[in-house]
Amino acid sequence: MKILAVGAHLDDIEIACGGTLAKAIKNGHKVKTLIMSKSGYTNKDGEIQRTDESAVEEGTEALKILGVEDIEILNFETKDIPFRSDVVNAIDICISEYNPDIIFTHHPFDTHQAHVGVSNATIAAARRKNTIFFYEPISPSGRSYVAFRPQLYIPIEDTIDLKLNSLRAHKTEYHKFGKEDWIEGVNARCGFRGYEIGKKFAEAFEILRMEINILKEMKF
Ligand SMILES: [Zn+2]
């Protein structure tokens, strides 16, 4: 089975569905990640907080820790990825060429404008695809102002360590977001989602739509 995860930035996918992607790879599925920006950014005073080069280097390392080898990074502006035809078109090209069975993308009610743009653009680009899941906003993703409704849980006991190590590989973010406090926060969310289904760790998703056969083929 082929899985495509779409994210605005290097780190979004690892935080929200890194355990699931690592698990899919362990189960023999193909995984591709499409990141819409090189992900460097400045603060409101224009001072560089993260260069494109370090974001790409750290993000590539992080995805490799999960086992992802097919990594495509586009060149949209980090903070400005709107729901617009050129963004839809870029995702459409990737979907047409890769032909995924499952697509993961941002929750459309995230509060980061680039996450919202990418979510809506993915929904538009994936209009002919049958299985699309929204991953859960987890800090530093924007907090949702509409409650996230967990509808699909994927246990990640076997890959939680890979997920947390992939976050540590984002050295710039790791230092900015509180080092091990950040890791512990993400770990706690996965522990909470796991607790809800009687497992140690899990990631949760909302279902936009889903083809029923997909569950059999996931072999999760
Ligand atoms: Zn992001």
Image (cartoon, grey):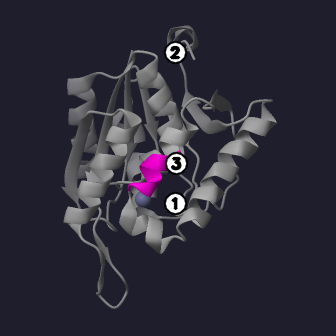
Give whichever of discs 1 and 3 has the lower sequence position: 1
Q: Position of residue 188 (x, y in %)?
A: 69, 52
Give the residue displayed 75% in from the left and 30% down from the top.
199
The residue beneath circle 3 is 164
194 left or right, relative to 11: right
Query: Vertical placement of 161 versus 139: above or below?
Result: above
Ligand 1: image quarter = bottom left
Distance CA(mark 2)–CA(mark 1): 27 Å
Q: Is residue 207 visible?
A: yes
Give the residue displayed 36% in from the left and 47% down from the top.
62
Frontmost of labels 3 and 2 is 3
- 131, 163: nearer the viewer: 163
Query: Vertical placement of 190 versus 92: above or below?
Result: below
Q: Is residue 17 visible?
A: no
Q: Are marks 2 and 1 in contact (CB under 8 Å)?
A: no
Instruction: Choose top left, top right, bottom left or bottom right for residue 51.
Output: bottom left
The residue beneath circle 1 is 141
Query: Vertical placement of 196 versus 14: above or below?
Result: above
The residue beneath circle 2 is 218
Q: Which amino acid lies under the numbered mark 2 shown in the image of this protein?
A: Met
Categorize mark 3 by other alpha carbons within 10 Å: few (<14), some (14-19), many (20+). many
Q: At numbered mark 2, what does the secondary structure look like: helix, strand or loop?
A: helix
Q: Which amino acid lies under the numbered mark 3 shown in the image of this protein?
A: Leu
Q: Is mark 1 within 8 Å of ligand 1?
A: yes
Which contiguous range is marked in magenta? 164-169
Categorize mark 2 by other alpha carbons within 10 Å: few (<14), some (14-19), many (20+). few
56 left or right, relative to 11: left
